[in-house]
Image (cartoon, rainbow, N blue to C red):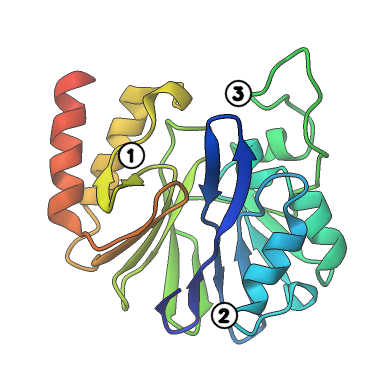
Amino acid sequence: MELADGVYALELTMEREDGTATFHPAAVETPKGPVLIDAGLPGQTDQLADALATHGLDLADVRTVLLTHHDGDHAGGLAAACERAADPVVYAHEAAAPYVDGREFPIKSDPEGERYEPVPVDVALQDGVTFRTDAGPMRAVFTPGHAPGHLAFHFPESGVLLAADALRGEDGDLVGPAEHFTPDMAEATRSVGRLAELGAGVGTIHCYHGGTVDAGIPEIEAIYESLAAEHPE
């Protein structure tokens, strides 16, 4: 699905005991080649390559990978994706980088189990960093709470918001982050409030869980108000 000029919603699936889980990374075309936003789980690299190919993109041409955060369903497939891409530059928020590169153990992973393969982070991002893309500027928005250093990405000229896990889609509606997987709901609530302050430049919201939702600032504001009542500062 094309969300805006050169902004593509991808789809990866995994079979679980309770059914099929679907994940929605994204790809963005830029003057210097495609950017991949999140890499899925270990073992999903072939799916990722196929999803890119449906939009005429080749994983081997990816020169940049942006991680929204370090959870395994976003960063677990990073090492394999980097092996098949064109020696990409890896970006993550400075607070997420230690979990991605192996200095810290992923906070939601079983401490008795194995972690995904660490990958060095080449560039530590901060709030407000803006990338030049075919769809206009893409700005990183710091949205922690669901995970340290969580980022969303906003395209103000096309009205697209890549919300990652700061928001979710559920049966076509926009809902808040999954509380069971969000260690700091008070901070996550503040992050939803930060997204509500983006202004009128949001009309399409792409969520890693739940896919693309036709929604904008009024829906985000309503979610924020509901969450704030449950998780006051």
Pointer 2: what residue?
29
Residue 49 appears in which quarter of the rendering? bottom right
User: On screen, 171 above or below 202?
Assistant: above
Pointer 3: what residue?
108
Q: Position of residue 30 (x, y in %)?
A: 58, 81
For the residues carrying marks 3 and 1, which lies nearer the camera in this image?
Answer: 3
Task: For mark 1, give the secondary structure.
Answer: helix
Task: For mark 3, give the secondary structure.
Answer: loop
Pointer 2 and pointer 1: residues touching (CB < 8 Å)? no
* Separation of marks 2 and 3 at Cα, in angstroms: 31 Å
Q: Could you tell me which quadrant the N terminus lies in?
A: bottom left
Which residue corresponds to the image point at 29% horizontal and 71% vertical from the top-left? 159
* Separation of marks 2 and 1 at Cα, in angstroms: 27 Å
Q: Is residue 64 left or right of residue 199?
A: right
Q: Which mark is residue 191?
A: 1
Q: Could you tell me which quadrant the C terminus lies in?
A: top left
- The residue under label 3 is which amino acid type? Lys
- Residue 89 visible somewhere in the drawing: yes
User: On screen, 66 above or below 49?
Assistant: above
- The residue under label 1 is which amino acid type? Ser
Which comes sooner in the sequence, label 3 or label 1?
3
Which residue corresponds to the image point at 57% horizontal and 80% vertical from the top-left? 29
For the residues carrying marks 2 and 1, which lies nearer the camera in this image?
Answer: 2
Q: Position of residue 7 (x, y in %)?
A: 48, 75
* Separation of marks 3 and 1 at Cα, in angstroms: 19 Å
